[in-house]
Amino acid sequence: MSQITLEIANTPDLELLLSLVKRLDIKVISLETEMANKRTQQINQLKAAAIDPLFLADVEAVNEDFKYSDAEQI
């Protein structure tokens, strides 16, 4: 049995590779969790932003700026 080790730095390439793995019925021995850790970090940043008063004020200001254009109909 042959083995190969790949290091992939971005999500689209990883998704493509995993789709090929599934299609070709390849056995994956291990998948490093660096990408999962990055996703967890991004989710935690979003959760922090959801309660950050400055971020929420910015969102409110943008909503106010676009309230009339959002109501326009084409």
Image (cartoon, rainbow, N blue to C red):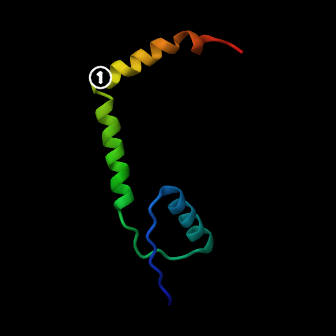
**Residue at point 46% right, 12% down?**
64
Quadrant containing the C terminus is top right
Q: Above or below — where is 7 with respect to 10? A: below
Q: Specify the farthest residue to the top.
A: 68
In the depicted structure, whether residue 53 falls above or below residue 65: below
Q: Is residue 49 left or right of residue 29?
A: left
> Which residue is the extreme one toward the right?
74
Give residue 66's position: percent from left, percent from top: 52, 15
Q: Residue shown at 44%/62% (left/top)? A: 9
Give the residue number, with chain letter if any, for mark 1: 54
Quarter-wise, where is residue 16 in the image?
bottom right
Helix, strand or loop under label 1: helix
Q: Amino acid at mark 1?
A: Leu
Question: Which residue lies at the image location 59% right of the left edge and 13% below the top edge?
Answer: 69
Residue situated in front as seen by the camera: 23 or 38: 38
Within the image, what quadrant is residue 61 found in?
top left
Q: Is residue 8 above or below residue 51?
A: below
Judged left or right of residue 42, residue 20 is right
Q: Residue at the location (56% across, 9% down)? A: 68
Q: Position of residue 47 (x, y in %)?
A: 32, 35
Residue 2 in percent (x, y) is at 50, 88
